[in-house]
Image (cartoon, rainbow, N blue to C red):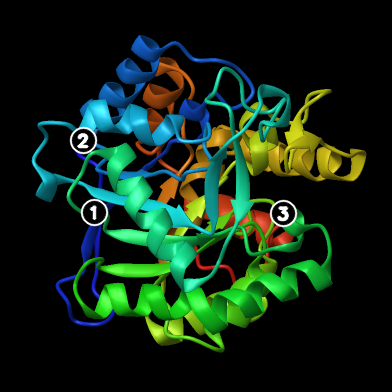
Amino acid sequence: MPLKIKHWDRVGNGGLTFTELGFGTAPLGNLYRAVPDEEAHAILVEAWETGSRYYDTAPLYGLGLAETRLNRFLRGRNRDEYVLSSKVGRLLQVCPPEQRTGIGKFFDTPTRREQYDYSHDGVMRSVEFSLERLGVDRIDILYAHDLDTYTHGSQAAMDARLHEFMQSGYSALLSLRDQGVIKAFGAGINEWRPAQWLVERGDFDLFLLAGRYTLLEQEALESFLPLCEKRGIGIVLGGPYNSGVLATGPKPGAYYNYAEAPQDILDRVARIEAVCKRHGVRLVEAALQFPLLHPSVVSVIPGGQSIEQVRSNRTILDATIPAILWSELKSEGLMRGDAPVG
């Protein structure tokens, strides 16, 4: 069964056609473990073979490694057959090995350190460097990367970066879109509140929201997602498994938001999983399919660090989810009553 597609065209420039299942390349930047080059290439080929035609990357992922691996994979492919996004907000500087960004998180990467730069010049330089690493003629979507407290450490630091971006880098992205260099721009963010702050102050097209609209979390329905729906803003949903707990289930050591899941999260996931089991549905199937039921969500990008994970993500989308499962989750207080379910 082919993947479903969603065509999105907010500003009348022809828009973009997304496969409901995209591929996030952070794992191919050697996130948490080193992946050999040939294995990384085979994983990308498998994603293509299973029908994914949306690929998201960023300079941060492996400090340029994920983009250079995409270079090999995309070379020779018809540029009109896939959608490609990357990110701005970080420039990579050569540095001594001990000063490398991401020690203990990214492995066997170039020795580079990140420099945050959300200025007009920083955005333009970032795009130029990404085009070179990727080896392509164009990038379809650019996201301002990590304008959130998770990344910058405090509300004050995040606010400073948000204002820097809106006062400078935003105009670069707006110009690139208006000139037809890119089709769309937005932000790739770990929290929905700064995303809403941006929507209220600019003309954004798409947001890559990591883990903030999942089977476990739907707070973004309070105001952000309704605002996106009203303005025709698309959502790419990263982290549909909340870093792992919605894929593995509530086992000891399960991950939630890149750390070991606390007991209250494990307990809630256990209750959700129990409802799924009553209806013959695996937790991971409900978790991957749920975000796609929202009209603003154009694609989910769970990523994959093995061929088996990529195949599994594809198979999960073919599972049948009975409507009563969603109804029961709502009646038991495990899902917001206003969550779209079909």
- Check disc 2 and report the residue beneath it: 1
Question: In x, y percent, where is residue 146?
Answer: 61, 58
Residue mark closest to the camera, 2 vs 1: 1
Residue sitting at the far right: 263
Q: Which numbered mark, 3 or 1, is in the foreground of this view?
A: 3
- Check the image and report above or below for 186 versus 151: below
- Residue located beneath label 3 in the image: 151
**For this rendering, which residue is in front, 198 or 22?**
198
Residue 93's x, y, as percent?
A: 55, 41
Question: What residue is drawn where x is 34% and y is 10%?
Answer: 38
x then y, percent, for residue 315:
37, 29
Q: Label 1, on which residue?
A: 5
Residue 328 found in image quarter: bottom right
Give above or below for 100 relative to 214.
above
The residues bearing labels 3 and 1 have C-alpha atoms spaced at a distance of 32 Å
34 left or right, relative to 55: right
State yes or no: discs 3 and 2 in contact (Cβ < 8 Å).
Answer: no
Evaluate whether residue 310 shows in this view: yes
Q: Is residue 120 above or below residue 80?
A: below
Figure quadrant of the C terminus: bottom left
Give SS at disc 3: helix
Inter-mark Cα distance, 3 to 2 = 39 Å
User: What amino acid is labelled 3 in the image?
Assistant: Thr
